[in-house]
Structures are given as structure tokens and as C-alpha cells.
Image: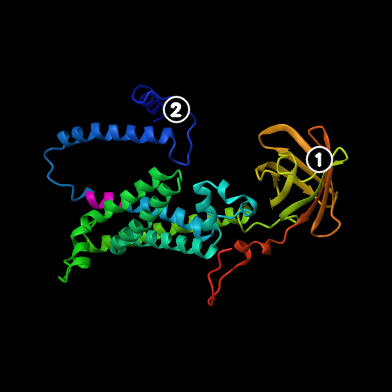
Amino acid sequence: MRPVRKWVAAHVFDKELGERFDGGDDLNAWVGQFTWLLGAAAATPVWSLLDRRRTNYETLDPWFKVVVRFCLAGQMFSYGAAKAIPLQFHLPLTKLVEPFGNFSPMSVLWAQTGSSKPYQVLLGCAEIAGGLLLVLPRTATLGALLCAMELTQVFILNMTFDVPVKIHSFHLLLLSLVLLAPESARLAEALLSDRAVRASSTQELFRSPGANRIAAAAQVAAGLWLLRAQLRNDWSVWKTYGGGREKPELYGIWDVAEFTVDGERQPPLTTDVQRWRRVVFDSADAVTIQRMDDSLDGGYVAAVDLDSHSMSLLKMADRKWNATFALQRPDDDELTLEGEVDGYRLRVRLQRLDLAAFPLVDRGFHWVQDNSYMA
């Protein structure tokens, strides 16, 4: 598709395609969808002409629906497992000290959902439930209805919080509507009238009842295998890179109590964009430095060795840049770093903040509330 997309982009939209962003809504994706639409528009009349003697697709239709069901169920398992583990949304420590006005709309959504693990897990379980209902032929309509409701919410969130999965979520919503379309009259009767709902006219895959029972069992087995594989993969990622990994010894937010450059102590002025305000240790191999203007510099790879009392920093954007600090830790919540950075001799004394001081972390859940708490 890439050469075709590039040609369409250049000759139809007068655009040059860059590297593809797999997130979903870049120029590659939009041009690609337009190209597929052109291909479908050209192929459909040719197909219709060549197959004009056929009056229906009663044999192909049920197999087509099986493919659509499993495409949709696989995606519901993928997104559902990433929430049920939970892996998709998280609340990094840097968000606790970053001004809310600096958040992007997508960052607001991620932080809001990541701040409540039970909510995220329930969202994931609902998406998994929709996928499970889809893989069993008898409950496929209920599964499509549940998926349509969930994907409508997802699509609205992607549109209103500028999440770059708008095309993909819209396609998944369309898949659920394709499955619901043949049952729309029966659903309307069930929801809007008092009449008895007639039986479904869905065509079976095979003529033999025994063969259809075997096919149904095979579909359930395939669906459960897909779900198990997705959960197993996400659990491994969560344990290795997500919230299930072991927290580093220096985990936390450290306030800079004293910042000295070449022996001269620097006052904490908000106009001094070079002075550090905080250092955040969120994982064993990464450090984020917050400057006095509240900007966050998170492009550092860290190697902390408490036994040898040293810490090394590398910049991901500049492989030639590095800094090594001597590290002293008088007690658990105090830290001193001393080393050379960009030709200057730095000495930084830090104090770890108590995370319980942040209401977003410590507030928790209350059955009885005398007043609204909106700190």
C-alpha cells in the first residue's frame, strides 16, 4: 500500500507522506483510508457486474459475520485486557507536580482514568465481556450491542480529548453496527413495542445441526485462546514495565532544597530556567528533572548504584551527553548529588516529598461524606 498511498498523497492531496505513526490518525492513515475507499468504489461495480446472476449471498453471509465478529472481539480483548491488568492508563509521579494547565486534553484523560485503578479495571472487564459475548453465536447480537455502546463512548472520548485513535475506534464502532443491522427490526420490537419478538433469521454456517454445534464450540475455544494470549502478554508487560514492576529505592518526588553551581548557591527564582526545582524517580532507569519554571525534562536514562554511591545520566536525544554524580544519602528522605554537568560543577541537596500530601494519591474512598471535597 505504501507506494500507492504516496502516489495518491502527491497527486490527489498535493502532500508528501512522512514516516507512519502507528497510533492511527496521521496523514498516512487518512490517505490510506481514502485509497481503500477508492479501491472499494472501483471493485464493487466490477464485482456486481461479474456476479450479476447471483440473487443472494446466503452462504457467504454467515461466514462474513464470523470474520467480523472475531475481528471486533480480538480488538475488544486487546483494549479490554490492557485496562483490566491495568496497563493502558497510568498516573506517573510527574503529573502530581506538573501544572494542570500544561496538560494536553489527552493527558487529562489518561491521568483521570489512571488515577482510579478500580474504574480502569471495570472498563476493561466491560470490553472483555463484549468480546466474549461476540465469540458465541447465540449471544453475538448482545455482544454487538454491548460493544456498540462501549465503542460509542470510546469514539466520543477520542474526539473530545483529541486521542489519535479516531479512525480506528470509528471503524470498530462500524463493525458492531454491521453486526447489529440485520437485527435492528427485532431490537426495535423488543425495546419499543409490546409485541412478541420473532425468531432470528440468521443463517447457520452448515446445514447439519451437529456441524453447527462443533463450529460454535470451535468459535468459543478460539475466542478464549485469543483472550488468554492477550491477558498473558499484557500481564508480562505490566510486571516488566508497568505498575507491577518493583519500585526503585529512590522512588518518589524529591524537592531541591539547595542548588549550588561552581560553589555559588543559586536562589529558587522562577525566572532561573536552569535551576532544578524537583527530581522525580518514577522507575529504576529513568529520571525526570523539573525546572523552576515548572517545565519537565524527562529525556534521561539513569543508572543508580547505591552501593558505589553514584548516579549516571544519559540523554536519549543526545547520545554523546552524559553526567556522573557522587551520591550521598544521610537518611531515607535526604539525598545529595555532586558532579559535573555541561562544564559546571553542581551540588544538589534534595528532600523526598511525602506522597500522602497529594489528595489525588491519599484521598481514597469514603462512604460517608459530610461535605464535598474538592481540594
What amino acid is labelled 2 in the image?
A: Leu
State the quadrant of the C terminus. bottom right
Residue 136: x %, y % from top left: 33, 62
Residue 265 location (% of width, % of height): 84, 43
Residue sitting at x 38%, y 43%:
167
Label annotation for residue 324? 1
Q: Tell me if 65 is positioned left or right of 50 in this view.
A: right
- Distance between mark 1 and mark 2 Cα atoms: 41 Å
Tag 1: amino acid: Thr
Q: Earlier in the sequence, mark 1 or mark 2?
A: 2
Q: Secondary structure at mark 2?
A: loop
Please report contact status of discs 1 and 2: CB closer than 8 Å, yes or no.
no
- CA neighbours of label 1 inside 10 A, class few (<14), some (14 to 19), many (20+): some
Q: Badge 2 is on which residue?
A: 17
- Judged by its main secondary structure, the magenta piece is helix
What segment carries the magenta color? 61-66
State the residue lying farthest toward the right: 263
Q: How is the image coloured?
A: rainbow
Which image quarter is the N terminus in? Answer: top left
Q: Secondary structure at mark 1?
A: strand
**Residue 52 versus residue 145: which sits nearer the camera?**
145
Residue at 81%, 56% in the rendered image: 334
Please give the count of numbered marks on the rendered protein. 2
> Relative to 105, is 313 on the left or the right?
right
Q: Measured from the top left, where is residue 323 in percent x and y?
A: 78, 38
Task: Classify residue 205 by image quadrant.
Answer: bottom left
Instruction: State yes or no: residue 358 in magenta.
Output: no
